[in-house]
Image: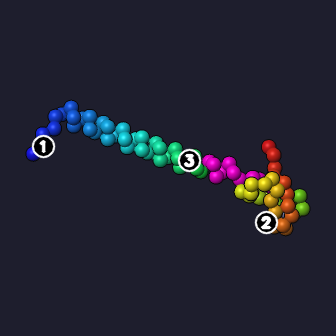
Amino acid sequence: MIVVSFEAFVVFFLVAGLLVVVGLWLFYDLRDKSYYDRQRSLRAHHCVRCGALYASRAKTEVAACPECGFENASLRF
Ligand SMILES: [Zn+2]
């Protein structure tokens, strides 16, 4: 039988608890970071031809309207 002192037992559970908290912190931090990076890459456009409001993930400033195909520049706020 393995004999473990009370102090080692307490330290083991403290370290295990801290590892769980740090692991959850890193998991949720990385998940939120990727979510906000995806949201930030969206560009809002307003079609001057048909009035549609739409978003695109295009790298360029211009994106075609999904309703009429007219190419509009992204909105600036
Ligand atoms: Zn349009």
Residue at the top extreme? 7
**Residue at point 56%, 47% (across, down):** 32
Q: From which residue to which does the magenta span run?
A: 36-45
Where 5 sits versus 58, above or below?
A: above
Relative horizontal placement of residue 33, taking residue 8 as reference (left or right): right
Q: Are marks 2 and 3 in contact (CB under 8 Å)?
A: no
Mark 2 closeness class: few <14, some 14–19, many ≥20 residues within 10 Å: some
For residue 66, the mark is 2
**Mark 1 near ligand 1 (CB under 8 Å)?**
no
**Residue at point 28%, 39% (across, down):** 13
Quadrant occupied by the N terminus: top left
Q: Are marks 3 and 1 in contact (CB under 8 Å)?
A: no
Q: Earlier in the sequence, mark 1 or mark 2?
A: 1
Which residue position is annotated with label 1? Answer: 2
Which residue position is annotated with label 3? Answer: 32
Q: Position of residue 73 (x, y in %)?
A: 84, 54
Residue at the right extreme? 49
Q: Position of residue 22 (x, y in %)?
A: 42, 40
What whole-number distance in Å separates the C-alpha atoms at marks 1 and 2?
69 Å
Q: Secondary structure at mark 3?
A: helix
Amino acid beneath label 3: Asp
Residue at the bottom extreme? 68
Amino acid beneath label 1: Ile
Q: Position of residue 69 (x, y in %)?
A: 84, 67
Q: Secondary structure at mark 1?
A: loop
Q: Secondary structure at mark 2?
A: loop
Please state which of the two labelled residues, at mark 1 or mark 2, is closer to the viewer. Answer: 1
Residue 46 in view of the camera:
no
